[in-house]
Amino acid sequence: MLEQDIQEILFSEEQLKTRVAEIAREIERDYQGKEVMLISVLRGSFIFMADLCRAIDLPCTLDFMSVSSYGSGTTSSGQVQITKDLSGDISGKHILVVEDDPDINRLLCRILTDGGYDVRPAFSGSEAMLWAEKEGFDLVLLDIMLPQLSGMEVLRRLRRESQVPVIMLTARDSVMDKVSGLDSGADDYVTKPFAIEELLARIRAALRNQTGPGTGTCLSAGEVFMDVERHQVTVKGTPVELTKKEFDLLRHLLENKGRVLSREALLDAVWGFDFVGETNSVDVYIRFLRGKLDDAFGIKLIHTVRGVGYVIKED
């Protein structure tokens, strides 16, 4: 009997069904009015993907790919090979790669092109700004140490005109460098040398979290008002300047007003499912938001539910 071979049940059937339903609701909310493509990596994810597909109340297409790094052995070779590629087309995302090292730039462009992305290389900060003015990009990979204009200055100039996702790519690994980049509007920060798989995961997460233009969505709680399309927040009629990550976090909390969200759920929604980092990132940005909203205007907007997470309540 199969039961005799099971030493321990980690998750019950009911727990799995509940979590699948939760993920389905999150997908429905994030992709409302759109057709969803689900990509299953064979073979381990097939059963889960079939359950998820049935649970999503949106038009869905399902595609499959298979990868291997083991070959005929039991130890990973470290080289991932695609043994079955997608049958559908997922290309079309336009990415600006800003990196002054020609070898790294070419490598990144080749990897992204092979991944189905449309890529534009730039080798200096000034060249990056020229392309940004001429073309619309879905994402920018931006090195900090650039000739002519630094990566930080390029980021600041981009943020004056656009909320395009920006991933900082740099050899500088100090906490203050990361905080400075994130506070200036960067969506993520990848340190060289980096794993290709991690970089691609962060790109997917940033694209997944991108706020599309023209949504016309307005959110509010008490005296806090958010205009998503214009990327503006006001409290008691006074404009409040937020970084992109602060804005995204506040937006997700407002969209789920009255619902307690765990740190892990906020990481998944705002930083992306593939985010690699510490869960105290949520606590840090909640503190930033409270300083700019609750403390600055004498309101109580963001509440802590001990041992669970955070919730926006209208007192």
Image: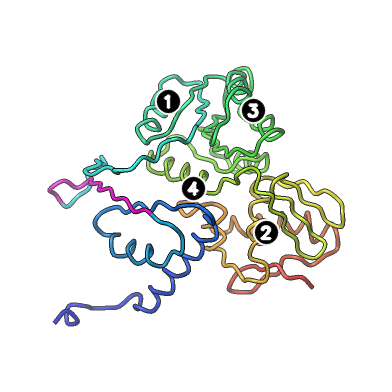
Q: Quadrant of residue 149?
A: top right
Kind of residue at badge 1: Ile
The secondary structure type at the circle numbered 4 is helix
Q: Amino acid at mark 2?
A: Ile
Q: Nearer the viewer, residue 283 or 96?
A: 96
Observer-nearest residue: 43 or 62? 62
Instruction: Look at the picture and state if 258 lies above or below 87.
Output: below
Quadrant containing the N terminus is bottom left
x, y percent for residue 84: 23, 44
* Along the viewing direction, whichever of 59 and 121 lies nearer the viewer: 59
Counting residues from the N terminus, which is met first, the one under dot 3 or under dot 2? 3
Q: Residue at x 77, y 70 (%)?
A: 314
Cα distance in 3D space between marks 4 and 2: 21 Å
Q: Amino acid at mark 4?
A: Ala
Q: Nearer the viewer, mark 1 or mark 4?
A: 4
Q: CA distance from mark 1 to mark 2?
A: 36 Å
Residue 192 - label: none
Quarter holding the C terminus is: bottom right
Q: Residues within 10 Å of mark 4 (few under 14, many from 20)?
A: many
Q: What's the residue at 46%, 45% (across, down)?
A: 204
Residue receiving disc 1: 104
Looking at the image, residue 208 sits to the left or right of residue 64; the answer is: right
Residue that carries the numbered disc 4 in the rendered image: 205
* Residue on which the image places disc 2: 286
301 vs 5, left or right, is: right
Q: Is residue 110 magenta?
A: no
The type of residue carrying mark 3 is Val
Mark 1, secondary structure of its residue: helix
> Which quadrant of the figure has residue 107?
top left
Q: Which residues are magenta?
A: 61-73
> CB under 8 Å between callouts 1 and 4?
no
Q: Position of residue 220 (x, y in %)?
A: 75, 61
